[in-house]
Amino acid sequence: MGEAMKNSIPKEFADLLEKPAFASLATLMPDGSPQVTPVWVDRDGDSIRVNTAKGRVKDRNMRRDARVALAIADPANPYRYLQIRGRVVDITEQGADQHIDKLAMKYMGKEKYPFRSATEVRVIYKIAPDAVNTMG
Amino acid sequence: MGEAMKNSIPKEFADLLEKPAFASLATLMPDGSPQVTPVWVDRDGDSIRVNTAKGRVKDRNMRRDARVALAIADPANPYRYLQIRGRVVDITEQGADQHIDKLAMKYMGKEKYPFRSATEVRVIYKIAPDAVNTMG
C-alpha cells in the first residue's frame, strides 16, 4: 500500500528524520526470525544511522546479518510514515560517543546522553536503503 | 537490555494493549529480509491480533513465514515499551470485518473503519508470543 518506492528518502518525508521521531528497527535473530526495537536515528546523506552499545541483541544481529528494516512515523500523524528496507553498510566505534550525544540532544534536548554506563562501548551502524516506501 | 523475558504479556504492561498504541510489526520477505509496518493491534487472551487486507506485503509474508515480531511503545512515554517475538498461529477472514471496526473504534473513535475499499478482504492474524521483553 506504499505510495512510492525508491531507494532514497523522498524530500517530502525528510522531516521525519529531522524531528525526534522514533524508528522501529527490525533485525534478524540467529534463526532468521525478526526482532524489533524502538531506536533513535539520524541521517547521513542518503544513509540512516543508528547507535547502540556493543553486545546488545541488535548489535549482534546486525553484525551477523546486515539486512534490516525501519519504520518511522510522524509523531504528529501516525498515518504518515516511512518504511525502509536496507543493509548495514558500515559499523564503527569511531565518533560513536559524540554521535549518541548528538542523538540525546535531538531526542531529549540534553547535551550528554544520560543513560550511558561506564563500561559500554557505543557503536554507529550506517544503513543504506534498498527500498523506501511512504504512506500518508 | 530487556528487564523481563517471558512468553506472556506482563500485567504491568497490559495497558499498552488497551491504549490506542501503535505496534510496529516485523515480517519476513521472500528472501528472509525483514520488513516493518505500523499496525493496529488488540489482545485476545495471551495472543495479539493484527488485521490487514488480503494480498498486502505483510499478508503474503505472514502466510509464507509465520515468524513475526512486534514493538509497542507507550504513547505517553516512548522509553516504556513491549517487545514481542512470536508466530502467527491462526489466519482467518471470519469476524475480520467486525474486528477492523473494533480497531477503528479503539484507534480513531469511529464506529466503522473509514479506509475500507469495496474490494478488499479483511483478515485477522493471531500471534502467539514466544518471547516478551519489557523496557521502562
Image (cartoon, coloured by chain):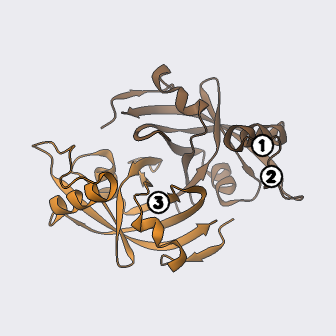
Chain colours: A brown, B orange
Which element carries disc 3, helix, strand or loop? strand
Q: Share a chain, discs 2 and 3?
A: no
Q: Chain of mark 2?
A: A
From the top left corner, tell me how far across and down residue B19 is, in percent. Answer: 42, 63
Q: Amino acid at mark 3?
A: Leu
Q: Is there a contact, CB below 8 Å, between mark 2 and mark 1?
A: yes
Q: Residue at x 69, y 65 (%)?
A: B1
Disc 2 and disc 3: Cα gap in Å?
Answer: 26 Å
Check residue A93 in the rendering and tell me which mark sits there, or answer none.
Answer: none
Q: Which residue is mark 1?
A: A110
From the top left corner, tell me how far across and down residue A124 is, in percent. Answer: 74, 41
Q: Chain of mark 1?
A: A
Q: Share a chain, discs 2 and 1?
A: yes
Q: Residue furthest top?
A: A11
Q: Quadrant of residue A50?
A: top right
From the top left corner, tell me how far across and down residue B30 is, in percent. Answer: 38, 48
Q: Nearer the viewer, residue A96 or B45?
A: B45
From the top left corner, tell me how far across and down residue A46 is, in percent. Answer: 59, 25
- Quadrant in the picture for the C terminus of chain B: bottom right
Q: Quadrant of residue B125?
A: bottom left
Q: Which residue is mark 2?
A: A114
Q: Report if residue A34 is visible in the image.
A: no
Disc 2 and disc 1: Cα gap in Å?
Answer: 8 Å
Q: Report if residue A108 is visible in the image.
A: yes
Which element carries disc 2, helix, strand or loop? loop
Q: Amino acid at mark 1?
A: Lys
Q: Is residue B63 left or right of residue A99?
A: left
Q: Which residue is mark 3?
A: B70
